[in-house]
Image: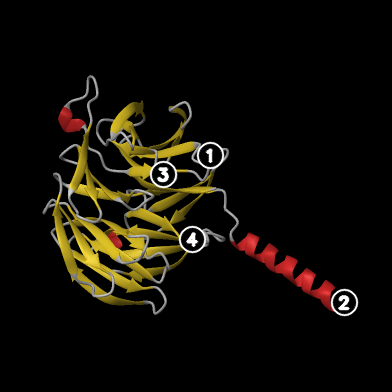
Amino acid sequence: MLVKTFKSVALVLLLLVAQQSQAKSGYVFVSSEKDDLVTVFEAKSMDKVTAIKTSERPRAMKLSKNGALLYVACGDADAIDVIDVATLKVQKSIEIGEDPDRFDLSPDEKYLYASNEDDGLVTVYSLEDDRKVAEIEVGEEPEGVLVSADNRLVYVTSEVANMVHVIDVQSHELIENIVVGNRPRRMLLTPDQQQLWVSNEVGGTISILDTVSYQPVAELSFSLRGVRAESISPVGMVMTKDGQRAYITLGGANHVAVVDIAANKVIDYILVGKRAWGVTLNHDESRLYVTNGKSDDLAVIDTERLKVIKSVPAGRVPHDVVVDD
């Protein structure tokens, strides 16, 4: 009887530890390029908690699956800073090569893939061994990096070549070069992994590609009354978990486009701040967060009403936003 009781207590303790390790911090993180800071907000109130000093020019950010670490690409320092979310301090800096712009983690979080904009390279870094394992040459000014959910492929955009490069994870070799629109920036895979979406900043479009044939499925364009076509510069994208809706920031057009994914159709536009750039959803997808690089603020949008409900100062030239609620 005592043995059974002991086992039951042990099981409860293990479950509690597991729950605690997966507990959300309740924070919203915003990187600001000009301040060399990541500003931390309390998600419910959007009150500022603190600002974390980083290496120079923090831009792209990604949270580890367990929420313990926040990775930050610091372009002018040629590094990826690693922030301990529990202490809100930089734990270490990873030397990753010239001007890291964006990056992604492998699904098992063993590897980090970073685009080195100045060198035209993708750096593969082993997080387990704490070392570079490969440098892969791609087109000029690589930016977006995205690892497929099955951990077989890495997609990389080249702003100058107007291409998406497809890299085999095992061989570290380029297996495909896909021509897209003018100055491709970011990418998304639909939840079913059947389509790759690519934002073309200067082209003002979204290229939608089939992930088997790499052929174009559709192209999204945007039209806003009173806004010149050249001001419409799509960059940031996020999709809902059910694959029904996408939100796309339109840069100098100062709006976010709301897209019906099945119909490949824009259903609404939301006015935000100046130069809408980074974008993400919170856990239950009730809130959308948008960084506005020229008005130095973060817009919080109610996704049911499709209206901005709050705007908070977020440092000089806020770039990316990550929510851990």
**In the rendered image, which residue does mark 3 sit on?**
280
Q: Which mark is residue 181?
A: none
CB contact under 8 Å: marks 4 and 1 = no
The crowd level at tag 3 (other Cα within 10 Å; few <14, some 14-19, many 20+) is: many
Up-down: is 225 above or below 52? above
Q: Amino acid at mark 3?
A: Thr
Q: CA distance from mark 4 to mark 3?
A: 16 Å
Residue at the farthest right position = 1
Disc nearer the start of the sequence (4/3): 4
Residue ID for mark 1: 46
Residue shown at the point (29%, 77%) measured from the top left: 133
Report the side of 231 relative to 81 (left or right): left
Residue 112, position in %: x, y?
35, 67
Element type at marker 2? helix
Picture quadrant where residue 204 is located: top left
Q: Are marks 2 and 1 in contact (CB under 8 Å)?
A: no
Classify mark 1: residues with Cα within 10 Å, few (<14), some (14-19) or many (20+): some
Residue 77: percent from left, percent from top: 30, 63
Disc marking residue 2:
2
If you read the primary sequence from the N terminus, does the residue marked by circle 4 or circle 1 appear first? 1
Q: Which residue does the image show at 55% across and 40% down from the upper left?
A: 47
Coordinates of residue 195 in the picture (x, y in percent)? 28, 49
Residue 297 or residue 154, whichever sits in front: 154
